[in-house]
Amino acid sequence: MGLHRCHDTSAGVGNPAYYGDTRTQTISVLNRIKENLEDKGLEMGDIIKLTVFLVGDPANDDVMDFAGFMEGYTEFFGTAEQPNLPARSAFQIARLGQPLMFVEIEAIAARE
């Protein structure tokens, strides 16, 4: 459910600024998830489970930037506006579909 948007299209594919860092990509993916949920009459508070796949960042010795992910994540979850915290698993993986993509998120939402 989490699709990337280009952060800086003028940077060109292959340039780190094209997709942005882990924090930027997390926010991008979560905004896409939010839009998809809203199209279905759901909201971020309806998410019950997230599976997060993080690629090692070359700027971080090829280790996933979990702190950067959390900076983006906490803009959407555990806030005064949206206090729910879904169950979450996060894994470092070798690669996503494009070089310099660092974040993929699967979300499961349910309404009571």
Image: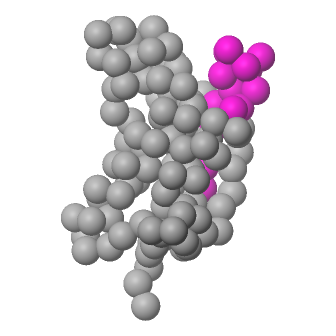
Tell me which corner region of the image, top left, top right, bottom left or bottom right, holds residue 3.
top left
Q: Residue furthest bottom?
A: 112
Q: Which residues are magenta?
A: 51-65
Magenta stretch encompasses residue 88: no
**Residue 56 seen in the current view:** yes
How far across and down, in percent of the image, does residue 16 sit?
50, 13
Instruction: Tell me the residue at 60%/28% (across/down).
Output: 95
Most foreground residue, 109 or 71:
71
**Residue 93 seen in the current view:** no
In this picture the colour scheme is: one colour
Q: Residue furthest left?
A: 39
Tell me which corner region of the image, top left, top right, bottom left or bottom right, holds residue 23.
top right
Most foreground residue, 89 or 60:
60
**As drawn, 99 above or below 104:** above
**As drawn, 30 above or below 45:** above
How far across and down, in percent of the image, does residue 6 sit?
34, 26
Magenta stretch encompasses residue 59: yes
**As drawn, 98 above or below 106:** above
Instruction: Tell me the residue at 60%/69% (across/down).
Output: 85
**As drawn, 19 above or below 24:** above
**Figure quadrant of the C terminus:** bottom left
Instruction: Tell me the residue at 27%/65% (across/down).
Output: 38
How far across and down, in percent of the image, does residue 44 sit?
42, 66
How far across and down, in percent of the image, does residue 35 sit?
29, 56
